[in-house]
Amino acid sequence: MPLGERAGDKSESRYCGVETEFNDDMPQLLAYNISSGGFDFVVATLMDPSYRPSLVEKDCGGSGVLPFAGSDLVLSPSQWSSHVVGKISSWIDLDSEDEILRMDSETTLKQEIAWASHLSLQACLLPAPKGTSCANYARCVNQILLGLNSMKLWLRIPLWKTDDDSMDVDSNRLVDSWELWNSFRLLCEHHSQLSVALDVLSSIPSPNSLGRWFGEPVRAVIIHTDCFLTNARGYPCLSKRHQKLVTGAFSHSIQIVLSGKPVHSLPKGSSDLAANHDDSTLDGVQRHPLRSYLDYIGYLYQKMDPLPEQERFELGYRDFLQSPLQPLMDNLEAQTYETFEKDAVKYIQYQRAISKALQDRVPEDKASRMTTVLMVVGAGRGPLVRASLQAAEETGRKLRIYAVEKNPNAVVTLHSLVKLEGWENIVTIISSDMRSWDAPEKADILVSELLGSFGDNELSPECLDGAQRFLKDDGISIPSSYIPMVEETCCVEYGWTCFLDTPRVKSHKDVVHFETAYVVKLHNVARLAPTQSVFTFTHPNQSITKSNQRYKKLRFEIPCDTGSAMVHGFAGYFDATLYKDVHLGIEPSTATPNMFSWFAIFFPLRTPVIVHPGSSLEVNFWRCCGPSRSQSYAYVL
Amino acid sequence: MPLGERAGDKSESRYCGVETEFNDDMPQLLAYNISSGGFDFVVATLMDPSYRPSLVEKDCGGSGVLPFAGSDLVLSPSQWSSHVVGKISSWIDLDSEDEILRMDSETTLKQEIAWASHLSLQACLLPAPKGTSCANYARCVNQILLGLNSMKLWLRIPLWKTDDDSMDVDSNRLVDSWELWNSFRLLCEHHSQLSVALDVLSSIPSPNSLGRWFGEPVRAVIIHTDCFLTNARGYPCLSKRHQKLVTGAFSHSIQIVLSGKPVHSLPKGSSDLAANHDDSTLDGVQRHPLRSYLDYIGYLYQKMDPLPEQERFELGYRDFLQSPLQPLMDNLEAQTYETFEKDAVKYIQYQRAISKALQDRVPEDKASRMTTVLMVVGAGRGPLVRASLQAAEETGRKLRIYAVEKNPNAVVTLHSLVKLEGWENIVTIISSDMRSWDAPEKADILVSELLGSFGDNELSPECLDGAQRFLKDDGISIPSSYIPMVEETCCVEYGWTCFLDTPRVKSHKDVVHFETAYVVKLHNVARLAPTQSVFTFTHPNQSITKSNQRYKKLRFEIPCDTGSAMVHGFAGYFDATLYKDVHLGIEPSTATPNMFSWFAIFFPLRTPVIVHPGSSLEVNFWRCCGPSRSQSYAYVL
C-alpha cells in the first residue's frame, strides 16, 4: 500500500519496505508484512543464516540442496519481483584475514545472487563492507555485475562522516563513508546496476556533506527504529534533520526501508507491542509492530506539497541527456514550435520588455503620430509578433513589423496567422535568413529569441551581429545582453552513467563526444559551490573588434564540511536582460519562475575528478569561433 | 473506423486509407473521407500540383510562400500524424532527360518531405519511378533518408511481372517490377525507413512471384477501383487472386489504400453515385463514392478467422532476432522454465513416447514385477519427471527415476516438487552435470529435452554421448534421433534490417556477429524453395568414431515463375523422433501443431545474394566440434 497520494508523483519513493529476519515461509512473511502490515516490499534474507559452504559435507556427491527460503514456486513470479528485495547474508566478509570465512563468503554471495537472478528479483541488498578495505569484495561484485541480468545491486553504506577536522591519520577508523562507497564504485567501474542503500544512524552529517549523496545513485534509505525520537503523545517521530533527509529521499525517487525492532512503548492498550512482537493484536486485528513507524513515514510523505505543474512536465526528462537543438542548421518541427509557444511566462516577459522600450522610444504625446519599426528576427510561427502587437496595444504605440524567418515551413504558418488575425497592414513577412536579408529600412527595435541554455550557444551573438546592420544607431535590441553562467562544480552520478550509456557516446568512444555539451534537466545532482558568471554579450555590439571569442578562468571553492566529492562536469545556465529591469534566466537562484523553455546545459568531464575538502578547482573556459561553422566551447581544469 | 474486429489482431492492417486529390481545405478533406466516409486515413497530395519551382519569379526576394495544402495549424498534431499520409507530387521525375523538369523535381521533392517532417507525418508516399532507370531518384531519396526524422517513405511500385519467358533484351519495357524496387533499395542501402506501397493492377503475377513480396518491407497495398469486378447484385468485388493478396496483406500488417473514381453503378436509387461524385446522398446522408469498395474490403477482413492463441502469443516476437539460449553454459531463470513448462503439447508427445517405450520394455504380464530404471537428464524443474510418472500410471508399469539437473536453483524446485507430490520413494534427485555424474546403476530409458531450434545446436549430441555410459546396451534414448533441416533459401527483408540494427551486430561490425545464428519467429519472409534435411543424429550413438562433426552440400532450385529474389539467409528447423512413430518437430510442413517452445533458427548471409529465375543456389554446411567449447556451424555458398 503506497505511503499516500501526492498529485503528480509516480516515483518509486511512494513504496516503503521493511527489513525482515530469515523466514523459511515466504508466503507467511509476505502476508504478515505486506497484506496486513501495510508495507510494499520486504528486504528478506534469502538463505538460512547458519549455512556455511565449508560445513557442508564434501562427499555427499552433488545431491545437496541449498538452504534457500522456500522454492521459486512458493510465490508467483510477479510477487517475487514486486514485493521482495533479496538481502544477501550479512555475515559475509570477503576481505577477512580468515581464509575459510573469505572463501565461504564468496561462494555464498555468488549462490545467493544466482538464486535472486533465478527469481528475477528487481534488486539485492549487499551488506556494508566490514572494514575500510573492500578490494576483494568489490572485485567479486564487479565480476558478478558483468554477468548479471537486469537485477540491481544496492550496496549498504552507513551514512557517517565525522565533523572532526583533526583526522588521525594512523587510525583505521572510518571518517567519511562516502570514501568507502567511492572506492567500491571505482573498482566496479561506475557500473549502472550498482547503487547505494544508505543506512541512517541517529546522528546525521552536515547539510553540505549530506548534499553530496543526492548526486549519487542512492536507491534506498534504511532507517533503524533507533533513529526515532518520541513525541509528546508517546509516538515515534524524527528529528528535523532526519525529516529533511526523508523528504529529500522522496523527491529523489529514493525508497525508505524500516529496520529493527520497535523501541517505543505506545500509550494505551498497545503498550505491550514491543515485548510481544509476533502476535500483538489491537482490537482483535493483528497490528504490525512497526506500524506506528510506517504511519509516521506516511505522514511525512502526505505532508509534502503536490508536485508543481512544471515539475510534472519535466519528470520524463530528468537526468536525460539530449543534444542541444541547432535551429540555425536544422529547421524545427511543428510540434517543437508548439511546445515552446506554450511557455506563456517567457512571452509575458518579452511583452513587458517591448512595452517599456516602446514607451522610452516614443513619448506619450507623440504616440498617435510616430510609427516604430520593429523587426522580429527568427519569428518562427509568430509568438513574438503577437507579443509585440500586444505591447503596442497596451502602450497605445503604433508599430510596423517585419517578421524575418528562414524556415519556409514556419513561414506558411506565419502567413496564415497574419491573414487570420487581419494584421496584413502592420506585419510584413520575410522568408529569409536574417544574415542575408536586404532590409528596405532600418529598425528602431530588434526582437529575437535565439538564446540557448548557455545563452550564446545557439549562435545568438553571430546572428544578432549580422542583423545589427539594419538596426538604427540608437536602436534597441531585445535582449540587450546575456551572461552564460557555470554553476559550481557539480556532480551527476546518474547523469554520468546515463551519459556513458548514451548510444552516441558509446558508439564513438572518442574525445569529441565526451567534450560535447548536453541539454539536461538536472535532478540527481549535488551542487558543490555557487554559480559564477562566465562571459557577457551585449547588443547592439559596440565593441571595436566585434569578436565573440571569449576566455575566462574560474575557481570554485568547496566548503570544508562537505567532505570529498567526485566532480563529473559543470552545469551551465544563462541570465539575459531583455530590456532594462526585465530579465529572463534559468540560473537556479535567480530563475524566472514557471518557465520551461530551457533546461540546463551540462559540460561533462571525460574523467571525473575527486576534490578534497577545502581544496579548490580551477577551470578555463573558451568560446571559440570559426569562420563558417558553429561556435564551440573548450574547458580545461 | 477500423475495418472490423478480429480477435487478437492489433496490427495496422485494420486501418484502411484512401488516395485523394489535392484539396486546400484539409479539415474538409478529413471530414469528408474520415468522419463521414469511414476511412481511417487519407493519402493526400501536400502541394498544389501546378507548382513548379522554375515558374516562381526569381526576384520576389524570399517572401514567397510555398503552396502547401493549408498551414500546420489547420489540423491538430495528432490529426496530422494519425490521419494523413503525405503524397509527394506525382509529376516529379528525377531521371528525366529534361534538365528543368529534373531540377524542379528534386527541389519539390525536398520541399514536400521537409513540410511532411515539419508536420511529423508518419509516412509519405513517393511516386513510382517513371522508367526502368531510377539512379538519380534513388540517390536523392537516399540523401533525404540520411537526414530524416522518424518518418517512413513508401515507394510506390506497380505489382507487375510478365510470365513471358522470351524476354526481349532490347526492350526497355518493364518485365518484373521487383527488379525496379531492388535496384532502388540497393542504392538506398537497405535503409529501414524505406518501404514499398504496391500498386495493384487488374492482372496479378503468379503465386510464387507474389510470395517474394511478403519477404519485402511492404507497408501498403493500393487497390484501384479498376481492379474490382462486379458481383451478381451489381456490387464491387475482387477476383480470388486479388482476395488472396488482400488477406495476405492483412496477416502481414500491410494497410490497404483505395484509389480512383467509382466505376460501379450501384443498383437501386444509388445508381447516380458514379456520376454525381461529390454531393451524392442516400436517404439524406452523404455517402462516400468509394463506400461500397470500402465495405467490401471490410467484409474480407471480417471474414478472416480469428488469430489462433499461439499466434497471439508469438506476435511480439515476429521477426525479432534473439541469441539462442545456452542452457549448458548459463542457468535458465525461473520465468524461462515457467514459459517452457506451459507447452503442454510437447510433454504430451513425450508422455506418449515414454508409454510406448515402457510397453516395449516390459511385457504386460511382467508389469507388476519389473521396475524400469528411467533417467531424466536435464530435469529442470521436473516436467519430464511428471510426464514419465504419468506414462507409468497410464501403462501400469513400475518406475525408478533419477532426475539429473546441473542448475542448483532448479534443484531447489525439484526437491520441493518431489516432497509435495510424495514421490520420494520413486524419484532420486541428482544435483550434477550429467557428463560428470557417477551413476549407481544403468538405465533402461534415458529421457532428455536438450533440443534447440536446429536440433543439435544446444549440444544435445555431446551431452547424450556423455550420458550414454550409464544407459544399458539395449537401452532406449528418448529422443532416439533428430534431423536439423534447412529451409529453402529464404528472404527476410524486415529481419534483415532488424538484424543490421541489432545492437550486438551494430557495435561489432565483424564477421563473427554476422555468422552467428539467431532464433527468430519468421513472419515477414518469402519461402523460395522446399526444406531439405542437413544432418542426422541418432541415440544411443552406435557409430564407431562417435564423432558429431558433419558436412553436407545442399542445392536449392528456385522455380522459374518466381522471378529474381534476394536471399538473406537460411531458415533452420529440426524434426525429432522421440520413439518409433512419435515425433516432434518445427519444420513448417510437418510441424507438431500448437507447440511454442521453439522458433526457427536463422543463418544470415553477410552479403545478401540475388538469385535469378531458374537458377540454383548451392550451400555447404559444416558442424564443427572443439574439444572443450560449444559446437559451431559454418556455411559457404
Image (spheres, coloured by chain):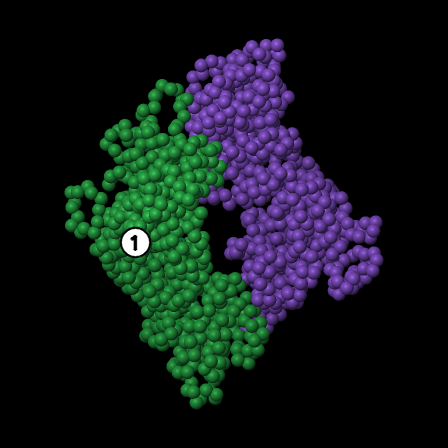
Chain colours: A purple, B green
Chain of the residue displaying label 1? B
Q: Give x and y (percent) for residue A275.
A: 79, 62
Quadrant of residue B346 in the image? Answer: bottom left
Q: Quadrant of the C terminus of chain B?
A: bottom left
Q: Is residue B169 above or below residue A576?
A: below
Q: Is residue A360 left or right of residue A560?
A: left
Q: Which residue is mark 1?
A: B232
Residue at the location (52% across, 78% down)? B427
Of residues A532 and A179, the one nearer the viewer is A532
Quadrant of residue A109 in the image? Answer: bottom right
Q: Give x and y (percent) for residue B379.
A: 49, 71
Q: Give x and y (percent) for residue A573.
A: 58, 31
Residue B187 visible from this viewpoint: no
Mark 1: amino acid: Ala
Of residues B592 and B392, the one nearer the viewer is B592
Q: Is residue A96 left or right of residue A438?
A: right
